[in-house]
Image: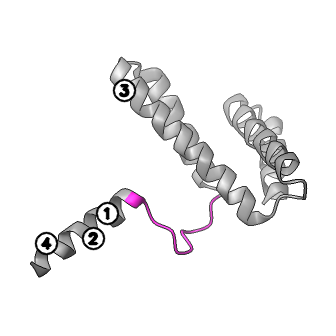
Amino acid sequence: MSDRLRAAMNEARKNRDQARTLLLSTILADLQNRDIELQHPVTDADAVEVLRRGIKRRREAVEMYAKGGRKDLEDREAAEIKMIEEFLPKFKGRADGKVVNQIAREELAATV
């Protein structure tokens, strides 16, 4: 996973895509910090967790910018979420907690 992120960052640098380069370098820095925190090399599972945290932070920022009327910043954060999602494996037994909660409520209401 880390190698894939580094390769993508180098590609973004070659293409002079500043936004993607900045995002990927930030993610790689987060991975390095996680590596130091864990005191062992980051596994793919650890990397996925770092990416998920990054997405969560950006989703919270999107909500705050929407409330504040900052559409430009909201759009930038949403674009970063889409870029990060490109590196995530396809769900592997995980789902959005809100969706799971909603489905559970509907099922429980149907059985009553």
Work out whether mark 2 precedes mark 3 in sequence or the reverse, and give the earlier one.
3
Residue 94 belongs to the span the image colors magenta: yes
Residue at 40% in and 60% down? 97
Label 1 neighbour load within 10 Å: few <14, some 14-19, many 20+: few
**Displayed quadrant of residue 74:** top left
Relative to residue 33, is residue 75 depicted above or below?
above
Work out whether mark 1 precedes mark 4 in sequence or the reverse, and give the earlier one.
1
State which quarter of the image contains the C terminus: bottom left
Label 4 neighbour load within 10 Å: few <14, some 14-19, many 20+: few
**Amino acid, disc 4:** Ala
- Marks 3 and 4, how far apart in space? 33 Å
Q: State the mark number for residue 66.
A: 3
Relative to residue 62, is residue 81 depicted above or below?
below
Residue 25 belongs to the span the image colors magenta: no
**Local SS, label 4:** helix
Residue beneath disc 4: 109
**Amino acid, disc 2:** Ala
Residue beneath disc 2: 104
Range drawn in magenta: 88-97
**Horizontal and vertical percent position of residue 54:** 61, 43
Residue beneath disc 1: 101
Relative to residue 62, is residue 70 depicted above or below?
above
